[in-house]
Image (spheres, rainbow, N blue to C red):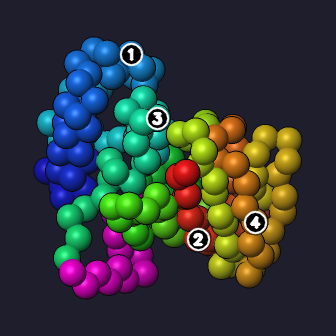
Amino acid sequence: MSEPLTWIAASLRRERTRAGLSLSELAKRAGIAKSTLSQLETGGGNPSVETLWALGVALGVPFSVLVEPPTPAVQVIRAGEGPTVASERADYVATLLSASPPGARRDLYHLRAEPGPARVSEPHIPGSVEHLIVGTGRVKAGPRGEEVELGPGDYMAYRGDVPHSYEALAPGTTFVLVMQHI
């Protein structure tokens, strides 16, 4: 079993237990099969971004809580390394750079995306705000019906607790996403 799958399995079991939910109840709330959840909790499978977001919303925890590895006192994540999760619906890969420490409620991601179908995201936990800064390429992002095209160095902030999307408009598009949970 790979390390990220080990972290995800342990996090799912911990958060499900903390919430006092059975496998069946959590699977139902997240809209996934009980067998899929059982497999994920034993470190099997290959969970998509969509599956992990649905589980995070059902558990009332940020996505990062489910994928964050144990962190040492000094942490360095080299380009192209770190815990990543791919989308099953778009050419979109999220790498968690920093999860929110106790007392703070924000997560930091580096994302790579290629032109193709947009990565459509369901609402995150209530009060979520996303901050996006484009590094390379061009991206069209934002809440459904309010998407904005951005280029290198552009910044935007928008509600993350409503349906929203990210669409790469140029090859090699990268951006940093800060998820703020109020």
Residue behind mark 1: 28
Q: Earlier in the sequence, mark 2 or mark 1?
A: 1
- The residue at 18%/58% (across/down) is 3
Q: Which residue is mark 3?
A: 57
Q: Earlier in the sequence, mark 3 or mark 2?
A: 3
In magenta, the rendered stretch is 73-84
Q: Earlier in the sequence, mark 4 or mark 2?
A: 4
Quarter of the rendering containing residue 10 = top left
How packed mark 4 is, by other alpha carbons closer than 10 Å (few <14, some 14-19, many 20 or more), is some
**In the shown orientation, is residue 108 left or right of residue 168?**
left
**Residue 35 in view in this figure:** no
How far apart are labels 4 and 2 at the CA level? 11 Å
At a point 69% along the width and 38% down the height, the residue shown is 163
Q: Earlier in the sequence, mark 1 or mark 4?
A: 1
Under circle 1, the secondary element is: helix
Pick the residue in front: 153 or 103: 103
Residue drawn at x 73%, y 54% as measured from the top left: 158
What residue is disc 2 on?
A: 176
Q: Left or right: 160 with respect to 3?
A: right
The residue carrying mark 4 is: 156
Residue furthest front in the image:
103
* Alpha carbon distance from label 1 to label 4: 34 Å
Which of 94 and 168 lies nearest the eye of the viewer?
94
Mark 4 element type: strand
